[in-house]
Amino acid sequence: MSDAETCFRWISDPQVTRMLGLTRPIRSLAQERAWIAAILADSRQQRLFIVADENGRAIGTCGLRGIDEAQGVAYLGIMIGEKSLWDRGYGTSATTALLAYAFGDLGLREVRLSCHRDNHRALRCYEKAGFLPSRHEAVPRRLERPELRMAITRGRWEEPRD
Ligand SMILES: CC(C)(COP(=O)(O)OP(=O)(O)OC[C@H]1O[C@@H](n2cnc3c(N)ncnc32)[C@H](O)[C@@H]1OP(=O)(O)O)[C@@H](O)C(=O)NCCC(=O)NCCS
């Protein structure tokens, strides 16, 4: 919650949020705090993390939603809010760390996501982290532009990669 103001600054930047497909855009710091509070209160189905750089500075968020322990499935989301730091590997690094949490700590069997087809930077980030195109059905949100669904299984995550 202490990062709420920073998060609000990030999601107030259209260049950052253009690709997020937020179903309910956040327009005030109070809404941002309420959004974070709702996630913190629902830790069974959602987890939200700050992405920090090497110096511990907050540069973005990532998380899991729709965590279904019975099915062993969750949906990943990520935003590097400091856009001057895009294309330096932070997104892939954070995604990889979140997968270690999902498969290791939570013991899930598959992590899924949906992404705008024209979000080439994100698609490349997910590809580097090991995601493959997927045909999974349910997604907890609708994107307004054509989307690509991707997923990674625990088995694929465990395979050695470069
Ligand atoms: C998507 C996002 C999380 C990626 O984080 P990042 O730190 O920029 O990602 P990385 O640096 O790890 O990887 C980006 C890759 O995309 C590549 N890339 C950048 N622009 C590209 C483009 N137009 N076409 C193809 N690849 C592109 C980069 O070169 C890099 O690949 P490389 O390492 O092979 O050179 C971040 O850019 C972001 O938060 N964007 C805004 C919010 C968003 O789109 N979130 C995802 C919603 S699904």
Image (cartoon, rainbow, N blue to C red):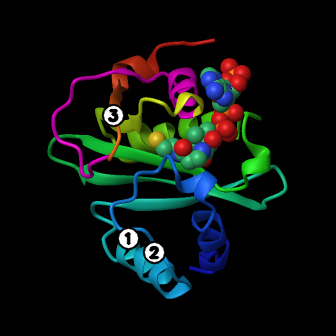
Say left or right for 81 vs 95: right
For residue 127, say whether it is visible. Answer: yes
Q: Is residue 32 magenta?
A: no
- Tell me what residue is drawn at x 42 percent, y 82 percent: 34
| Residue type, numbered disc 3 | Pro
Chain part drawn in magenta: 122-143
Please say if 153 is above or below 7. Answer: above
Q: Using the numbered discs, state the Cα–Cα distance from disc 3 to disc 1 in whole angstroms.
A: 27 Å
Say left or right for 80 vs 133: right
- x and y percentages locating residue 89 in the rendered image: 71, 33
Residue 96: mark in rendering: none
Q: Residues within 10 Å of mark 2 (few under 14, many from 20)?
A: some
Identify residue for label 3: 146
Say left or right for 49 vs 74: right
Res 112 quadrant in image: top left
Q: Which of the image's four quarters has the N terminus?
A: bottom right
Q: Is residue 127 magenta?
A: yes
- Dot 3 or dot 1, earlier in sequence: 1
- Tell me what residue is drawn at x 38 percent, y 70 percent: 39
Residue 39: mark in rendering: 1
Quadrant containing ligand 1: top right
- Tell me what residue is drawn at x 23 percent, y 44 percent: 139
Residue 36: mark in rendering: 2
- x and y percentages locating residue 134 in the rendered image: 28, 22
Please say if 128 is above or below 113. Answer: above
- Dot 2 or dot 3, earlier in sequence: 2
